[in-house]
Image (tube, helix red, strand yellow):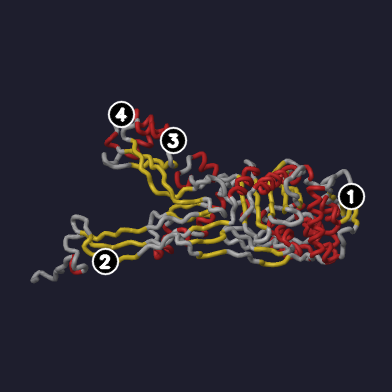
Amino acid sequence: DPEGWRVAWTPSLIFKDLGDGLIRFNADIPSRGRILDRKGRPLAQQGVVNRVGVVPGQIKDEGAFLAGLSPIVGIPPDQIKAKYATAQPEWFVPLKSLPDPLPAETETALRALPGAAVRKTPSRIYPQGAIAAHLVGYVGPITEEELKGLAAKGYVEGDRIGRAGIEAWGEQYLAGKKGGQLTVVGPNERVRTVIAERKSEPAADITLTLDLDLQRALEGALGDQRSNGVVLDTATGGVLALASHPTFDPNGFVLGFDDAEWARLNDEAQRPLWNRATQFAYPSGSIFKVITATMATERFGYAPESRIDCPASYSLPGQGNIWRDWAYPNAQGTLTLRNAITQSCNTVFYALGKQADDTDPNILPEFARGFGLGKETGLEELPEVAGTVPDPRWKRQVLNDGWATGDAINLAIGQGFLLASPLQMANMYNAIANGGALLRPFLASRVTAPDGRLLRATERKEIGKVPASPATLAMIHDAMKAVTTAPNGTALKAFPGSPVVVAGKTGTAEVPPNQYHGWFASFAPADDPKVTVLTMVENLDNLSAGSQVAAPIGRKVYDAYAALPPTP
């Protein structure tokens, strides 16, 4: 062209069959996989929700319409009006997602409001509601930052991905892989040419070790107080139940939360979204004493029948500090080491802590680490904390202070700087129950393709042995059995007429300013353990929180366990 260069271009130069056609991409998105309990009962699955909205052109009496719709969707009338103010008359403007099925009265009310409409939409649903919420987790919109790393896997803006719990851990299995067909279509939308095609890969189901009946029992027993609990399969380490309260309903991440519920979920004191059983670490109180007793037998030659004084208080010569027994001002007399565990005598263990510290201040911390404390348990599916086992090096590095004999005395009864998660303590007692094997806890039992193929299975994995001989473990078993059966057992009152004989250990940890955490660690049947149960309740005003609060919660769990049908 004399006036300059020109480009002669038509779409057919790229796709010869395009012509007046259009390119269409039809996505093939697999349905998200299910999360099931050990018996195949759904904890998370694909379903539908009812999207309630407005078709502006169908509204007849706007005032009556807004007044009638507002209480149904929980949105003020002026905000509803603002949402559809700029919409075309025929548009559907979504306002709120409601569970399916809708109550009959809601359906009737919506039909009586010209302009209101309902669209059933595929969605993730959690049929058990708040039960096992911290284990199952929830899904949420993918973020812009996440999309940068996941776009190559087929994720696009607007996708929802697992954000917590098994939903997050199992994303690679639950999401499947998207497919689709890129085609050229004519003006009549008929396919002219297939440019590219990729088949989708169906999502897999994840079956958990969780027993829904036991989970319900644990959550019901914990109630509304800040508390948590863990139930482990003694032989394998599989998590049969794990609960943290306060909790939440994961359906809210699909349906939406009202302002009050959102504020509750973000309350820093309550932290309902955090898993207290794995993400919080606490002073363990007297359930630590079995470690100190083990140290006494294995390192210092004590026998189960070795007799030790249990005075009402304990002090160091020349110092003003006084450490009291829980029975203060009464003394419990002279006890055997076995009975000191059963009766949870503080002053016996103060003396043992002092004896170890005089020899080497690292002895007791080393035994604590030998029982799995101070490091994560190895649970893959949920976030967890390592806790703290204090020793002279730790105190110097973290607090820039020297180790004192009082630190050892406090550690001997699970106080001072010691911090452990409930899962760690449950796993430690699980090792005591099974003969000394520290097992890696696990929650996902197997991952199964829709055609039945086993994609992944989790097996029992031993990660260590506790530093206790068979004789020491037998002593601890006997002492714990007496806790629930003997006249001087600290949990006797919680177990009258129990359907199963339980071996337990109570603990009450003092926390500032003047409150107590209650613990109960246990396993049953006492003579042939099959299940390990730990319950813990926070910040009580009860000096006997372990025996009077945590142990009765454990009893309720054992009642439910005894009522379960035999596992095939």
Give the labeled residue for mark 3: 103
Q: Is residue 331 above or below residue 33?
A: above
Q: Compare marks 4 and 3 and give the one earlier in the sequence.
A: 4
Q: Nearer the viewer, residue 162 or 396?
A: 162
Note whether residue 103 is visible.
Answer: yes
Local crowd size for mark 2, using a 10 Å CA cut-off: few (<14), some (14–19), many (≥20): few
Mark linked to residue 195: 2
Tell me the distance, in whole angstroms, between the alpha carbons under discs 2 and 3: 47 Å
272 relative to 119 in the view: left or right: right
Q: Quadrant of residue 184?
A: bottom left
Residue 330 pos. (x, y %) = 88, 44
In the picture as drawn, the residue positioned furthest to the left comes out as 2
Report, in whole angstroms, how far the alpha carbon at label 4 lies from the one at label 1. Answer: 82 Å
| Quadrant, the C terminus | bottom right
As drawn, the label of residue 61 is 4
Amino acid beneath label 2:
Ile
Q: Nearer the viewer, residue 466 or 545?
A: 466
Q: Disc 2 or disc 3, which is closer to the eye?
A: 3
Q: Secondary structure at mark 1?
A: loop
- The residue mark sitting in front, 1 or 2, is 2
| Res. 311 mark | 1
Asked if marks 3 and 1 touch (Cβ < 8 Å), the reply is: no
Q: How many marks?
A: 4
Q: Amino acid at mark 1?
A: Pro
Instruction: Pick whichever of labels 3 and 1 is earlier in the sequence.
Output: 3
Q: Residue at x 49, y 40 (%)?
A: 259
Q: Say which amino acid is labelled 3.
A: Pro
Find residue 412 and report its horizontal and vertical position in percent: 79, 57
Q: State how far apart marks 4 and 2 are (Cα).
A: 51 Å
